[in-house]
Image (cartoon, grey):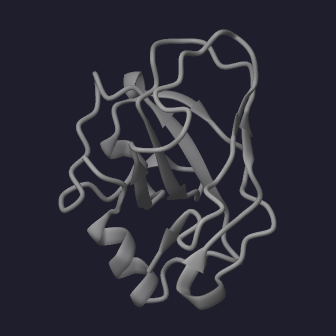
């Protein structure tokens, strides 16, 4: 699967339900053994089984939206243990999995897959034209 936006995440941006710059955005490291992304069918963090959610980042900082391109500071997952992580899913965090809307699924990036070793994992966003993603 290529990196892509979830359909319901795109709809939420267009409907004003997600504001990249003013709302809490996080990422979760995902074991795709227990989660098969459905870009058209999945909407909430709760659509990703708890067993597939390996580590959650802190809130994204210094978010920008220049030219329809989403960017933010690099993120850190703290003291990550568990199985191989094959994907990073970005979502709008409400504090409740059943209302935290999925935004993007990244499966093709430098450093993926990630083998957790109990240490912090720093995820550096792409510095190319599309940064994290482009709407």
Task: Determine the residue positioned at 45% across, 17% down.
Answer: 84
Residue 29: where, in percent of width, then height? 52, 34
Whether 23 is drawn above or below 47: the answer is below
Residue that extends furthest to the right in the rendered view of this protein = 62
* Rendered position, 54 above or below 45: above
Residue 122 lies left or right of residue 62; in this view the side is left
Query: In the rendered image, which quarter is residue 63 located in?
Result: bottom right
Residue in front for this viewpoint, 43 or 27:
27
As drawn, the residue found furthest toward the front would be 128
- State the image coordinates of residue 39 (x, y, percent, origin top left): 24, 58
The image quadrant of residue 87 is top left
* Nearest the eye: 89 or 70: 70
Question: Residue, x 39% and y 51% (percent of image)?
Answer: 105
Q: Would residue 40 appear left or right of 65 to someone viewing this image?
A: left
**Residue shown at 44% from the left, 58% from the top:** 99
Q: Position of residue 78 (x, y in %)?
A: 75, 27
Residue in view at x 48 percent, y 44 percent: 109
Quarter of the rendering containing residue 103: bottom left
Left or right of residue 79: residue 4: left
Viewer-proximal residue among 95 and 68: 68
Residue 21 locus on image (x, y percent): 69, 77
Image vertical order of residue 35 relative to residue 6, above or below: above
For residue 112, above or below residue 15: above
Q: Nearer the viewer, residue 47 or 70?
A: 70
Q: Quadrant of the C terminus?
A: bottom left
């Amino acid at each position: 699967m290529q990196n892509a936006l979830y359909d319901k995440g795109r709809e939420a941006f267009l409907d004003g339900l997600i504001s990249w710059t003013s709302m809490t955005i996080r990422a979760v490291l995902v074991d795709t053994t227990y989660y098969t992304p459905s870009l058209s069918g999945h909407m909430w963090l709760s659509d990703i089984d708890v067993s597939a959610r390996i580590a959650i980042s802190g809130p994204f900082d210094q978010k920008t939206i220049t030219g329809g391109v989403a960017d933010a500071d690099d993120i850190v997952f703290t003291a990550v243990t568990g199985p191989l992580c094959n994907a990073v899913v970005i979502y709008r965090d409400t504090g409740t999995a059943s209302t935290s809307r999925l935004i993007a699924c990244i499966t093709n990036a430098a450093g993926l897959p990630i083998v957790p070793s109990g240490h912090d994992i720093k995820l550096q966003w792409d510095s190319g034209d599309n940064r994290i993603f482009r709407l």
